Image (spheres, rainbow, N blue to C red):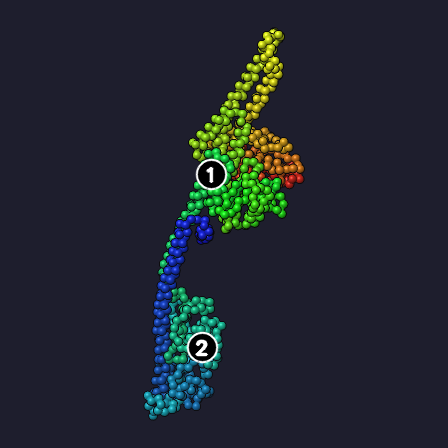
Amino acid sequence: MKWWKLTRLLQAGFKGKYNFPYKIALLILGATILAASIIGCISYHSARRLIVDNLERNALLEVKQRGNKIDRWIGTRKAEIELLANTPPVRSMNWYVAGPYLKSEVNRLQEFQHFALIDSDGSYFTTKVGRALINVSDRQHFKKAMAGEVYVSDPTISRTLKQQSIVPISAPVRSNSANYRDTTAQKPIGVINGVISIDRIAEVVGKLEYGAGTYAFVLNSQGIPIVYPDARLIGNIDKPAPSLLQSADANLANVAREMVYQKTGILLTKINEAKVYVAYLPLEQAEWSIALVIPSHNLEKELIPLNILAAAAAILFATAIFAAIAALILFAKNGIRTRTEAILHRLTGRIRAGLGIDRILQTTVEELGTLLKLDRAIFGWYDPRQDTVEFCWEYCRKGLPQRLGIFGATGGPSGDLAARLQRCETVILNKTSASDVAGFQKSAHLELTNSRYATVPVLTQTNRLGYLFAIANRQFANPDELEVLEATADSLAIAISQSQLQGQIQEELKLLEELLAQLRRTEEHLVKSEKMAILGQLAAGISEDINNPINFIYGRLIHVNDYIKYLLEIIRLYREQYPQPVPRIAREIETFDLDFISQDLPATLNSLKIGTDRIRQLVVAFRKISLPDEANKERTNVRESIDNILLLLAHRLSPKVLVVKEYNNQPPILCYPGQLSQVFTNILSSAIDAVNSLDNSEPIITIKTDIVEHFSGRFIAVSIAHNGCRIPPEIQQRIFDPFGATKSMKNFTGLRLSACYKIIVELHGGIFTVQSPVQSEIESQTGGGAEFIVQLPIV
């Protein structure tokens, strides 16, 4: 994960996302890691090579010392045979004289199984059987001895000892008259032969070891094993075996080749898939080579301290790298976060300062384009009926033409453009008409390329949907950049919603000039004194200030109405008592039309009373919704909360929408009224948006309340259903996902469904579910509608 983040930052850094100090820090870190890694690897391998070379020399030296012992053992046996060949009994070549002597020597020397005295024609006597009935003139050891050489033969099969494998050692026997020291004085008259069991040779070789798991083997001059752990591979003169030079194991064949060439050395290789060291050397007293196979861990166990030291150094180095990466990531992200917070802070300041929405949007797209180094940053309004986007505010890099106006994508069904923008597909937008702001433009299209742009919806409190576009000539829309765009879009939604709300308030209260002046002063005071004020707090203050004078006017209108009645009655009595007024009064009565005033004035006062009563209801409902929650829960009637919300949303309900209320008696519940009102406001807003888009069906919104029983207790169930379009199954599965619901449901505005879910489930311990299509009487040809069910525990 750390390396992935570093790679992502590396790409972003060299594409200009981060500033120059970040790039310098990145280069220094990379160069340091590379240099330290190379130096560490070279140092480790150098130290390891020195230690391994020293261990190999020591192992080979020890094998040589022990191999020399084997050589001396064989040399001793050769010397014993040569001494026997020069004793008078043997040189007499008379078995009756030599036989008893050789038998006594067998008992004395102990290393030989028996001795044989061979005549020059190949016939012989042995200390085992006496006179043998076979001839050995064809044996190699006999021929070598007759040639005057003391010879150690390769293993062979004994012809007199029941097919036993033996190693003959032969020496020439000369006549008694010859000087035994002069080997060229006379041709040998016979041969004396001492027989050693091959098991005895294996026993002597087996004493050569170098820790657990080692084993030794002996090869003759043809590479045939004489002594070997696998008895199936052992061969002799009479029973040949395959040479190891032709072994299927290439590594073993290579070792055998070195031994046949009479070389001395130590080799690291693999035999039978095991990593081993093979130390080998030739013997001087026989035409053999001996090898010792040592498991690699026996020899390399002295490398453990070095490996531990290297591992500790690697861990420390990796820790330092991760710490540096974490610091670099923090440094890079802090730069983006700081600049993002700065632009959001300036945007919030403009909102609080009450700047015009045009100025806020234009300044925001310019700062957003500069922050993310974009080619274009555009804000536009989406028209679902025409499936077009009207670009109203734009930032574009120097040298690029502006793209203001109404644009649409041809060739797709209605609503296809919004879906394609949400998936960030490649889209070519063609201009359909000139914008009122920009006037006529020659540019006719704008190409949005996949992975090089991002769009974020700006959800407002009305049916109008805005889009914030960010376009760059590079790989774009990584998580950090999307986070900046979404945060900016949320702030823009607040700004637009505030602008719209202020317009509605001014339109509804334009007759109260003095109160509006007071509201403006109050608003200015709040903007200056409360730097972290939000829309709900402002609305709560406004409703409080409106409520007092409205109550005053409403209360006084009752008395004014009574006073007017009294005055009109007095005027009527005057007219009855004085039917002929004086000329001056008669002229005034005729001028002001006293009869009309008498009839119209009560009606006018009644209209004023009705209007002020309506304003009082709106203010009370608005205040209950906008006031912040107290620290503790309060007892609240859910029916009254829903009715207050419907009263505030009445301006959004078209005359054709039928709102059906099915309220059952239920007790007040303990809850946070403000947050619960926000949930119902968002559910009802989404329902109104869904049914307002219906053209050929009667739009219906059904609100039901009831008491239900669960295993955990009693709950108040509030069902809000509509017969608009159904919610697709793939959206229902992730409708409470904080990153899926609001972007997937085009008609859902205000608080995110994930936030509604947290308020109901986590804050109040309730249940929040969605069904679509609706299994009730309101299901129609529109697609089945949707039903939001909120269940709150009765405490």
Q: Is residue 275 left or right of residue 653?
A: left
- Residue at 62% x, 7% y is 580
Kind of element beneath mark 1: helix
702 and 768: which one is in front? Answer: 702
Q: Quadrant of residue 294?
A: bottom left
Find disc 2 in the rendering and name its residue: 223
Please give the name of the residue rendered at 53% of the width and 27% of the height, measured from the top-left corner: 510
Work out whether residue 29 or residue 131 is closer to the camera in this orientation and state it.
Answer: 29
Which numbered dot is residue 347? 1
Q: Residues within 10 Å of mark 1 (few under 14, many from 20)?
A: many
Please tell me which residue is depicted at 56% across the width and 44% down the height of the picture: 441
The three-letter amino acid code for the residue at tag 1 is: Leu
Decide if residue 791 is in sight here.
no
> Which quadrant of the figure has residue 261?
bottom left
The amino acid type of the residue labelled 2 equals Gly
Q: Is residue 54 something that shows in the picture? A: yes
